Amino acid sequence: MIRRFQHLTLLCLVSVLAACAHVAPQVVTVVAVEESALPEFPNVFGDRPMIPTADQVSRLTPAQEQEFLAYFNAPENQAVKPYQRVSRYLFENTLSLQYEETTYTAAETLNFNKGNCMSLAILTTALVRLAGVDIDYQLVDSAPVFGLTGNVVSKQIHVTSLVFQRKDIDPTNITFQYPERVVIDYFVGKRGRFIGNLSADAFTAMYYLNIAGEAIETADYAKAYWYTLEAFKHNRSDAAVWNTMAVVYRRAGQLATAEQIYLHAIEHAEDKLTLLKNYRVLLTSQNRTAEASRLEQRIDNMDDPSPFHWYALARESYVLKDYSAALRYFDKALVIAPYLHEAYLGKAQSYYQLGRQVDARVAMELAISNVDRKSTRSLYEAKLMALSGN
């Protein structure tokens, strides 16, 4: 349940990334993919289903619109700034909103009173359009939680919505100005690392990509194909879109097409890690061991400056039970960001799975020494005690 609205934030799961590789979600990376010599996406999936347009995705029903506008235009609310009226309406109408890892349109989210964080962002978008105020989107990397036994609880990518009024900025004032704004966030008190801003087109593409990811999880590859194709119309620069399409073809047994897509995207992407890792999965599935080994070596020798890319790759390796590779990639993340307590925690978990209890305890101690939040520190200390047999 959403509590105090001043802290209401919109942490939105990009579920497609988890679905693409059947592992922990990857960091969304925007890359420049050249328009020339694009690979074809042959339709081997049948007729196109009914897919909502971008306008339909972020549109309420007439009754829902009337209810919001009655609140927005009520005389007793006119002393409140328009963007704040949007936030208050959201607060009052989402107190019982149930989190569910499903992506809905704006109308569905309000009607079902549930949805994932992307659903809440889409609902927010519908309201700001009716109110005539502004919205920006930011990608946020939230803090993960790990267990030392069983499966990892993965770190996830979220979209934070910022609602404001651009006209509040004085164009005659040459000083740098921030407009007053409200941050819409699903989970109260959760802090994450800013990854980057997200354009409206990229945000729309993420809706279709989320639906495609959910379809992959249920082996509905026809639906995944058509929704990924729709995502391409809005943002062909997102490496996740290319990776998703390749996964759709791979799961559908169209391995040659999947390989063509991987090779094209890898050639043009600035950040190649996720694409290379998933291409290696394809090679391994075809028993092309030598090629897969060379690709793994290429990944290991890459000089990617982002610790979070290596961290995401380490998480993926962990979920695939390749604990040695996970340790290598956690170490690569820590060379760049030695303060990254999540990476020390990941090392502890990997060592634990390898039966290296002493190394696991050392890694847990390093995780504790690098964490700031009291609640997280308490969690880590409890896990350290479990490792120590206390």
Image: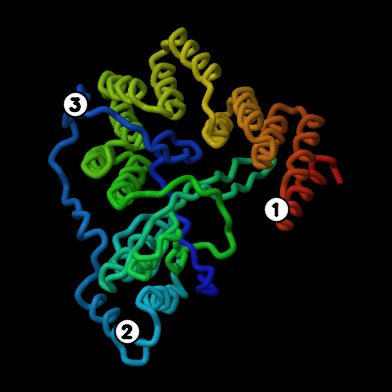
- Foreground pick, 293 / 304: 304
Q: Are marks 2 and 1 in contact (CB under 8 Å)?
A: no
Badge 3 density bin: few <14, some 14–19, many ≥20, Cα 10 Å: few
User: Residue 33: image x %, image y %?
Assistant: 30, 29
Q: Are marks 3 and 2 in contact (CB under 8 Å)?
A: no
Find numbered disc 1 in the image and state the secondary structure of the residue it sits on.
helix
* Residue at the farthest left position: 47
Badge 2 density bin: few <14, some 14–19, many ≥20, Cα 10 Å: some
Q: Amino acid at mark 2?
A: Tyr
Q: Are marks 1 and 3 in contact (CB under 8 Å)?
A: no
- Label 3 or label 2, whichever comes before in sequence order: 3
Q: CA distance from mark 3 to mark 2?
A: 49 Å
User: Residue 173: image x %, image y %?
Assistant: 40, 65
Decide if residue 362 is on the left or right side of residue 45: right
Badge 1 density bin: few <14, some 14–19, many ≥20, Cα 10 Å: some
Q: Amino acid at mark 1?
A: Thr
Q: Amino acid at mark 3?
A: Glu
Residue that mark 2 sits on:
71
For the point 27% across and 40% down, which residue is it? 228
In the image, residue 322 sits, relative to residue 381, either above or below, namely: above
In the image, residue 74 sits, relative to residue 159, either above or below, namely: below
Residue that mark 1 sits on:
376
In the image, residue 129 sits, relative to residue 191, either above or below, namely: below
